Image (cartoon, helix red, strand yellow):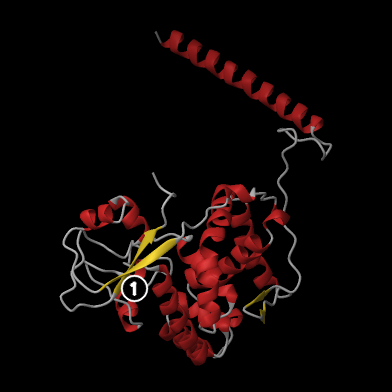
Amino acid sequence: MRKIVIGFTIAVLSIVTIGAIQMADNATDIEEKYKDPSTTLVPGYQIHSLPMPENLTFAGELVPLTDPDIQERFDNELLSNVYFQSNAIKLIKKSKKYFPIIEPILKENGVPDDFKYLAVAESALTNAVSPAGAKGFWQLMPATARELGLEVNDNVDERYDMEKSTIAATQYLKDSKKNFGTWTLAAAAYNAGNAGVNREQNRQEAEEYYDLLLNQETARYVFRILALKTILENPESYGFNVDPEHYYTNVPVKKIKVDYEIDDLVAFAKANNITYKVLKLHNPWLRETKLKNKSRKTYYISIPEEGYYK
């Protein structure tokens, strides 16, 4: 029995050895075949490193790409987002839908246009919900949202109202800019909080974002915004070609003034010739099946124009 086992083991080892030799031979053949850099294992498929942009700025403030650490950190985020192709295509399409809403609000409230890319970094232009409880396009926490004048409760959550939450975000950003003196630090403070950035400035005796050693998330934060800005400003330069017919677009709406309670939003939707689903699509800030409004507060409910839904 022992001889059989030994014989079997030797046979297996021989097969493995022969296989390894054959694999080595194949690897050598492949190496020889593809010494020519114009030839790839997958014909026509090339993956390239990316050049650094010239004079990269955020909100008019120069990014010091001559600093090797800054250059590497930006390059890491640019590579991660360029080669996450499906996500980039979706962001390009969504930006055509939502930037026309965000841009005029930023301008009207005195916040640089580049901050629209902060919303992309925060939520990928969706009404996202974080594990910590931040919600909406601008990922506002409940207490912060209330401080900024938004209504947040189980029935109404205005963090899901794009226009109102964008106005609230501009207020926070302007306060941060006043505190720190630069828009770049205001962006970093949106992630780490004003107190968090102030604490690190004092501890490290450094002022600028690019000179601070911050936690991993905040250290990447501005660079991710910059990478998204770089791609979305010039998508074709990075190989993204989206037919304008494929852009996501907004359905025009009319605003109905409501200063009363609505006991049944399903019935309200039907009375306005839309489904409950469509009502919620355009008014995600309505969190329940009714609108409680004993105080007779004024709300504006968006109703899509006819002809866009079945």
Q: Secondary structure at mark 1?
A: loop
Q: Is residue 87 above or below residue 141?
A: above
Choose top left, top right, bottom left or bottom right for residue 295: bottom left
Q: Is residue 277 left or right of residue 109?
A: left
Residue at image point 57% right, 86% down: 182
Give the image location of residue 42, x and y in percent: 71, 33
**Count of marks placed on residues:** 1
Residue at image point 45% right, 9% down: 3
Q: Is residue 118 left or right of residue 310?
A: right
Quarter of the figure that contains the C terminus: top left
- Amino acid type of the residue tagged 1 in the rendering: Met
Residue 213 in sight: no
In front of the other: 43 or 255? 255
Give the image location of residue 202, x and y in percent: 49, 91
Give the image location of residue 216, x and y in percent: 49, 69
Q: Is residue 184 above or below residue 235?
A: below
Q: Is residue 294 left or right of residue 43?
A: left
Q: Is residue 299 left or right of residue 59?
A: left
In front of the other: 122 or 105? 105
Residue at image point 20% right, 72% down: 260
Identify the residue position indicated by label 1 in the image.
Answer: 141
Crowd class of label 1 (few under 14; some 14 to 19; many from 20; radius 10 Å):
some
